């Protein structure tokens, strides 16, 4: 059986996201997981990887289900090391379980799949003249998400709800906030699950689940 490497910027295993990918893979690949924060306590994560002013902010899931907020700049060396280790173990296809931007990641021969390079152009093709709205995990990510999805000089409607701490009421409220300004909503984090999509879709606007989109695409590659 083929193997697909999954690297989360939080802790593995990702019992929330892996089942979504497995649904579309239909047994055609074995998932091998690794996490940037594996082996660290929440206190150690905060001490070593918490964002400082001006750094690119990311959030992910710890093994106990809690959320961790980290700096892209601080985790990049560890992330690259995880990629190198997977490639050295013979994994030829590696999926990054994060929709953030990670310039400069590299492999020697393995195919590294970065959702940030795939989801925005797919969404652009889906929307065309339709109005796009964004839901992301943290308020401080609004600018980065706009830079990723919006045309130059424009601003997209945005709401923040964490996939790790947000509840049904918060997801419904976020979607209600966006519904009169959008024709399509993207849940831009690999941590959102089908339940989150259903809560957001209750506002009557179609909702794209990032990890499901990636699962459908990757299933065609293995």
Image (spheres, helix red, strand yellow):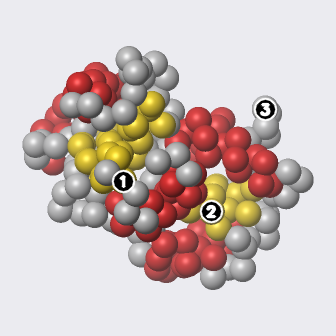
Q: Name the residue under label 3.
A: 152
**Residue plotted at (27% across, 24% down):** 84
Asked whether residue 85 is in view, the answer is: yes
Q: Residues within 10 Å of mark 2 (few under 14, many from 20)?
A: many
Gap in angstroms between the C-alphas marked 1 and 3: 39 Å
Q: Mark 2 points at which residue?
A: 208
Q: Earlier in the sequence, mark 2 or mark 1?
A: 1
**Residue 146's spot in the image, x, y percent?**
66, 42
In the rendered view, does 29 fall on the left or right side of 154? left
In the rendered view, does 121 fall on the left or right side of 86? right
SS type, badge 1: strand
In the rendered view, does 93 fall on the left or right side of 199? left
**Residue 144's spot in the image, x, y percent?**
57, 37
Where 3 falls versus 134 (above or below)?
Answer: above
Q: Are marks 1 and 3 in contact (CB under 8 Å)?
A: no
Where 114 falls versus 192 (above or below)?
Answer: above
Gap in angstroms between the C-alphas marked 2 and 1: 24 Å
**Residue plotted at (52% across, 61% down):** 212
Between 79 and 204, which is closer to the camera in this rendering? Answer: 79
Tell me the number on the disc at residue 18.
Answer: none
- Mark closer to the observer (1, 3): 1
**Residue plotted at (49% across, 23% down):** 103
Q: Mark 1 points at which residue?
A: 29
Q: Do the residues labelled 2 and 1 touch (CB within 8 Å)?
A: no
Q: How crowded is mark 1: few (under 14 residues within 10 Å), some or many (20 or more)?
A: some
């Amino acid at each position: 059986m083929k193997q697909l490497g999954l690297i989360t910027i939080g802790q593995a295993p990702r019992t929330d996201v892996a089942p979504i990918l497995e649904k579309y893979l239909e047994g055609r690949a074995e998932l091998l997981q690794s996490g940037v924060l594996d082996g660290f306590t929440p206190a150690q994560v905060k001490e070593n990887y918490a964002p400082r002013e001006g750094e690119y902010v990311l959030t992910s899931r710890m093994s106990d289900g809690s959320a961790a907020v980290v700096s892209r700049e601080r985790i990049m060396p560890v992330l690259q090391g995880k990629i190198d280790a997977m490639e050295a173990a013979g994994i030829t296809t590696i999926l990054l379980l994060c929709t953030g931007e990670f310039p400069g990641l590299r492999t020697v021969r393995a195919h590294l799949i970065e959702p940030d390079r795939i989801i925005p152009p797919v969404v652009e093709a889906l929307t065309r003249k339709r109005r796009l709205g964004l839901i992301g995990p943290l308020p401080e990510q609004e600018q980065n998400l706009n830079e990723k999805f919006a045309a130059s000089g424009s601003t997209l409607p945005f709401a923040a709800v964490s996939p790790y701490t947000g509840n049904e009421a918060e997801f419904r409220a976020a979607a209600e906030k966006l519904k009169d300004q959008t024709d399509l909503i993207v849940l831009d984090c690999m941590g959102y699950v089908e339940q989150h999509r259903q809560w957001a879709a209750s506002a009557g606007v179609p909702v794209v689940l990032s990890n499901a989109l990636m699962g459908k695409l990757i299933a065609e590659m293995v």
